[in-house]
Amino acid sequence: MHEMGIANSMLDAVRAEVERYPGTYPVRVGLRIGEVAAIDQEALKFCFEALTRDTDLERLDLQIEFCPRRNRCPVCGAEFIVREYNVRCPDCGEDATASIGGDELELAFLEVEEYGTCTTGAKSTE
Amino acid sequence: MERVQLERKVLSENDRIAAGLRARFQQCGVLCVNIISSPGSGKTSLLESTLASLPRGERVAVLTGDIQTDNDAARLRRFGFPVKQITTGGTCHLDARMIERHLADWRLEDLDLLLIENVGNLVCPASYDLGEAAKIVLLSVTEGEDKPLKYPSIFFKSDLLVLTKVDLLPYLRFDIECAAENARKVHPEMEIVKVSSQTGRGLREWLAWLNRQREAVHSLAVG
């Protein structure tokens, strides 16, 4: 439902970033989405395509990295993936572990290409 | 081809405005809370009974968000506190810019408590920081006990769960302990109060929670 706004903010950020690298254009953007970020990946991809079609970013490729919920144990220091809402430390059994990840909604990277270089098959599916 | 590492929040523009609001709230000693729930869980009713219980001189204001209509603001204005309606015109959540715009002609120095009623929606408001000190999620007992598991994001990010409409419990098969347990599965430190805005049951605990947060914010601003 709010993926259109998210996609729009993401493209604004991409455009702002590309301005810092004159003579280049963006070919791929990496996005990290946490398990509890409340973002639907398919809806976001749909919005991303709708917003970039027939624009300067039409050939921009979106790569999404899913980030599971992660906790750290304050007792033994173990870091682990929280599955099925089980926050108990798998190493020492401590119940009161602290969240360290899973709500990401971040731009991870941007790949830019210099104008004039070969762009055959630019929309990579790597 | 060159790869640039970004490590940048997608909503960095919203977060920038929210951080500015948060700094202003802290400086002025204003407790700002962001109240979120599904449509019809009782946000406006909870605010009505909250405002009704506060002495007229309390330095409290309300921003209430909806997609259309001024109905909620009209309900809340009866109590004599400043209330402003934010009509989003289709957007399913409030964002920091809307808050900043609607606060423009209010003096934060004159407030101790700012209650923000978000648009009725359990998903999208979770993504947008409004500069609040705490998010509060409401779950009414006419919904499902498993809602915290189905919509984990907002329960994960909220400091307080208010279980509402508890006067209806005798007529329902809702297992309130199961609902609380599910919320704590998602967010083990979650504080929980059980309230009926209709009968006033549990309101004292809710107001006590608010007061504790107000004192914490106030002592930080003074200290």
Image: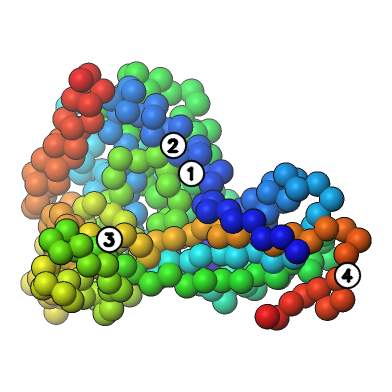
Q: Nearer the viewer, mark 3 or mark 1?
A: 3
Subunit that carries the residue with mark 1: B
Decide: marks 3, 4 in contact (CB < 8 A)? no
Subunit that carries the residue with mark 2: B
Choose between B82 and B163: the one closer to the eye.
Answer: B163
Q: Which residue is mark 4?
A: A118
Could you say where residue B56 lies in the image, as x and y percent from the top left? Answer: 21, 25
Q: Do pointers 3 and 2 mark residues of a single chain?
A: no
- For disc 1, the neighbor class at 10 Å (few under 14, some 14 to 19, many from 20) is some
Q: Which residue is mark 2?
A: B19
Q: How many marks?
A: 4
Q: Which residue is mark 1?
A: B15
- For disc 2, the neighbor class at 10 Å (few under 14, some 14 to 19, many from 20) is some
- For disc 3, the neighbor class at 10 Å (few under 14, some 14 to 19, many from 20) is some
Q: Amino acid at mark 2?
A: Ala
Decide: marks 3, 1 in contact (CB < 8 A)? no
Kind of element beneath mark 3: strand
Could you say where residue B207 lies in the image, as x and y percent from the top left? Answer: 14, 41
Q: Which residue is mark 3?
A: A99
